[in-house]
């Protein structure tokens, strides 16, 4: 079921996908629209968002910390609409895209890549058992967010692979918190953790190559099924997240 090899066709496919030019006009258009809608929904953080910001800053985070902004954005989006694996991706790319002064097209392309990757990873592991145990938005969304951020940072394939691996080791969030305030906080934290993972990889920190499908990797430890083809088949040419 799970590939114990040091190299991973799954990670290689995802890393390659993060680097290719986005040629699909419809994917670009939908991503741009989705980013715009996310910005509108999160334009004001509300009392809960301000409280979370104050709490994080009281723990030593500086006011302009991009991770804090991503955390609050993700939590705000998750409170104002049903969270999905796209939620951490959007929060992360908006926060980091603004920090990097990326263009709207660059942010949209990164969002498209991250949302598609997260949708495919979810399809590979999805089951009643998985959903009964994990917060799907945070546990899977962090992986798509890391790939999106690697694209924004223009990381090479080696560092992108490490960013994905560092994100995989932080994938978490319990389904038991569904309906509680913590569910939104978990989703926002996934966006912040994806930023941390990408920055660690950018500065030379490494992870296991087969982070998704390797022995003791993400799928082996968290999933009850794993369909490699759901991730790799048609990746980059056939978009499964067109309805996001």
Image: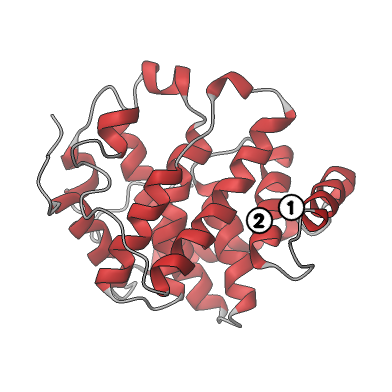
Q: Nearer the viewer, residue 128 or 218?
A: 218
Q: Is residue 46 above or below residue 43?
A: above
Q: Secondary structure at mark 2?
A: helix
Q: Nearer the viewer, residue 136 or 67?
A: 67
Q: Quadrant of the N terminus?
A: top left
> Is residue 240 something one can see in this rendering?
yes
Q: Is residue 244 above or below residue 219?
A: below
Circle 2 crowding by C-alpha within 10 Å: few under 14, some 14–19, many from 20: many
Name the outermost residue toward the right.
47
Could you tell me residue 2's position as x and y percent? 15, 34
Q: In the drawing, does residue 2 fall left or right of residue 158?
A: left
- Residue matched to label 1: 41
Could you tell me residue 172's position as x and y percent? 49, 36
> Is residue 241 something one can see in this rendering?
no
- Residue matched to label 2: 38
Q: Nearer the viewer, residue 97 or 3?
A: 3
Q: Secondary structure at mark 1?
A: helix
Q: In the drawing, does residue 233 fall left or right of residue 61?
A: left
Please name the residue shown 61% across and 56% down the image.
91
Please name the residue shown 53% across and 62% down the image.
195
Could you tell me residue 187's position as x and y percent? 60, 42
Residue 63 figure quarter: bottom right
Q: In the drawing, does residue 182 fall left or right of residue 97?
A: right
Circle 1 crowding by C-alpha within 10 Å: few under 14, some 14–19, many from 20: some
For the residues bearing labels 2 and 1, Cβ distance under 8 angstroms: yes
Please name the residue shown 75% across and 55% down the image.
42
Instruction: For marks 2 and 1, give the CA distance.
Output: 5 Å
Q: Is residue 186 above or below residue 100?
A: above
Q: Nearer the viewer, residue 138 or 234?
A: 138
Could you tell me residue 80's position as x and y percent? 73, 41
Please name the residue shown 34% across and 21% down the image.
127
């Amino acid at each position: 079921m799970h590939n114990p090899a040091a190299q991973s066709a799954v990670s290689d496919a995802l890393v390659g996908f993060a680097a290719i030019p986005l040629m699909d006009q419809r994917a670009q258009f939908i991503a741009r629209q989705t980013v715009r809608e996310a910005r509108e929904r999160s334009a004001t953080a509300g009392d809960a968002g301000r409280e979370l910001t104050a709490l994080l800053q009281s723990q030593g985070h500086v006011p302009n910390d991009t991770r804090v902004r991503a955390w609050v954005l993700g939590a705000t989006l998750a409170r104002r609409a049903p969270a999905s694996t796209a939620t951490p991706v959007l929060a992360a790319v908006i926060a980091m895209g603004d920090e990097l002064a990326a263009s709207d097209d660059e942010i949209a392309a990164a969002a498209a890549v991250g949302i598609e990757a997260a949708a495919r990873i979810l399809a590979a592991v999805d089951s009643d058992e998985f959903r009964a145990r994990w917060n799907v938005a945070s546990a899977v969304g962090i992986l798509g967010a890391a790939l999106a951020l690697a694209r924004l940072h223009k990381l090479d394939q080696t560092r992108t692979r490490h960013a994905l691996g560092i994100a995989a080791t932080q994938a978490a969030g319990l389904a038991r918190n569904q309906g509680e305030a913590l569910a939104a906080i978990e989703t926002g934290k996934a966006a912040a953790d994806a930023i941390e993972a990408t920055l660690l990889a950018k500065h030379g920190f490494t992870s296991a190559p087969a982070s998704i499908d390797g022995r003791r990797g993400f799928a082996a430890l968290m999933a009850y099924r794993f369909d490699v083809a759901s991730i790799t088949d048609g990746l980059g040419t056939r978009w499964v997240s067109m309805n996001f």
